[in-house]
Amino acid sequence: MGKFFGTDGIRGVAGEYPLNEPTVERIGYSLAKELTVRLGRSPRIVIGRDTRESGDWIESAIARGAITADGQVKSAGVITTPGVAYLTKALEADAGVVISASHNPYQDNGIKVFATSGQKLDDAAEQAIERDIELDASMFPPIKQATIESDASLKEKYLAFLWNEIGAGLTLSGLKLVVDCANGASSKLAPKLLAALGAELTILNAVPNGRNINLDCGSLHPEKLQQAVLAANADAGLAFDGDADRLLMVDEGGQLVDGDQILFVMAEYFLRKAVLNGNRIVATVMSNMGLEVALAERHITLVRTSVGDKNVLDELLKNGGSIGGEQSGHIIFPEISLAGDGMITALEVLRVMTESKRRLGDLASGFTRYPQVVINVRVARKPPLDSEPCIKDSMTELETELAGNGRLLVRYSGTENLARVMIEGQDEAVIRRQAESLANLIKEKLG
């Protein structure tokens, strides 16, 4: 990770450095300048945002900076992160810029950049932008006063792709779905797509006001969705996050179906269809041991990467695979899209349900989850964990206790000042006690 670019772009509090207006203008300028050097011509950039109140001015600042460096900018307005990734490739743009902090609260925002392929911007370009951010203001020309209007046809182009290509042959008639849009970027798109495919819908949290994105709703807070699925006697519930690159589901019995279970459902389906590339699934170190066991029973290999969809995608592209993802619901189908897309994931799982004529709870039942406890600890600094003797000794002791019967994972968040303690094991009460003890120690030493 760089100084400003984390595992998912630049992220922080909107209005504060590096997401204050002058710095955002520099980021737009630097991106267009770097692309011009590479291409030898004026770069084409497509930009989109989620529903945060800060998104509009950040988008405008990025655009002004890019236009000052002779970039050509198109705006899709409010659209999902994977929607921008799709448009970048479909329009043969040289870069796609997303203004979003994904699942974070409205006060935060972020800048994520996609290359023409739909992959995230390469490290060299990120490093060049980071160097420019820290230059003296005198090194930059005066920023041009320019405005851009959003082009509604770009959203329609993305919807048409989902409907006509991903949803080809899929009929949701007779399915009753409850959809939680997290008051985010999917608020208009997801209901329109699913209704066009024939589903009977109950829509939750699709009235964004700039401040209610992810607020007690969406994939981070699925409790009300679970209740709504039961109340509506629905076949399934869909929970997106703020920029709709993630999806969690709820089965007909009100039980949560997370990213691990979605990976399991899709792996079984692809195996039956004989299209599971390499008989392997890519997940992260956070995925449950139960997924690994269930896949092994079906002679499917689970390959683990470090946390982050970028790492999952890198492994898929390097060594092959039909699907990869994270427990959080960030799922990638590399033969369809190189970006995690909650709406693509929804259509894929709904296709499994309709083709197999099986309920979601039944499809997910072959995967028995190991008890898992995750505790987030706010930290003031992020030194290497093994450089803190007390923390290192405690981790070593825990790993000895868990040997053969569980897993310990401690890592820092790539986007927040948090340390995450994750323990899996056979007895939830025991691993919770172990996790709390280690979390308290980390808080004492690093908080």
Image (spheres, helix red, strand yellow):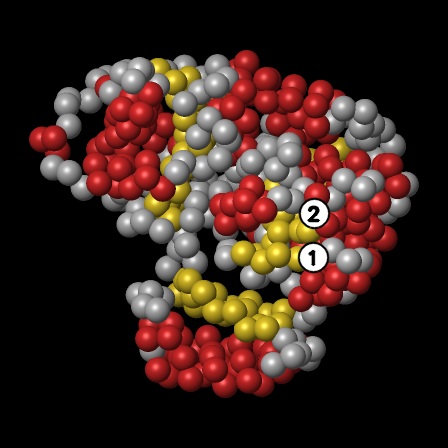
| Nearer-the-camera pick, 208 or 438 | 438
Vertical placement of 253 versus 72: above or below? Answer: below
**Residue 382 horizontal/vertical position (percent):** 33, 65
Q: Name the residue under label 1.
A: 301
Q: In this view, does 292 lie above or below 403?
A: above
Q: How crowded is mark 1: few (under 14 residues within 10 Å), some or many (20 or more)?
A: some
Question: How many neighbours does mark 2 have within 10 angstroms: few (below 14), some (14-19), or many (20 or more)?
Answer: few
Residue with the mark numbered 2: 278
Please identify the quarter of the rendering in which residue 194 is found.
top right
**Res. 77 mark:** none
SS for callout 1? strand
The tag earlier along the polypeptide, 1 or 2, is 2
Q: What residue occupies the far right of the structure in this picture?
A: 357
Question: What kind of residue is marked 2?
Answer: Gly
Taking the spot 71% from the left edge, 20% from the top edge, the residue there is 164
Marks 1/2 in contact by CB < 8 Å: the verdict is yes
Residue at x 33% of width, y 21% of height: 39
Q: Which of 247 and 200 is in front in this view?
A: 247
Measured as percent of width and height from the top left, residue 270 is found at 77, 43
Q: Give the amino acid at mark 1.
A: Thr
Relative horizontal placement of residue 207, taking residue 151 as reference (left or right): right
- Residue 355 image offset from top left, x and y in percent: 87, 37
Q: Residue at x 73, y 37 (%)?
A: 348
Q: Where is residue 144 in the image (x, y as percent from the top left)?
A: 21, 18
Instruction: Residue at 28%, 33% (x, y): give it.
Output: 27
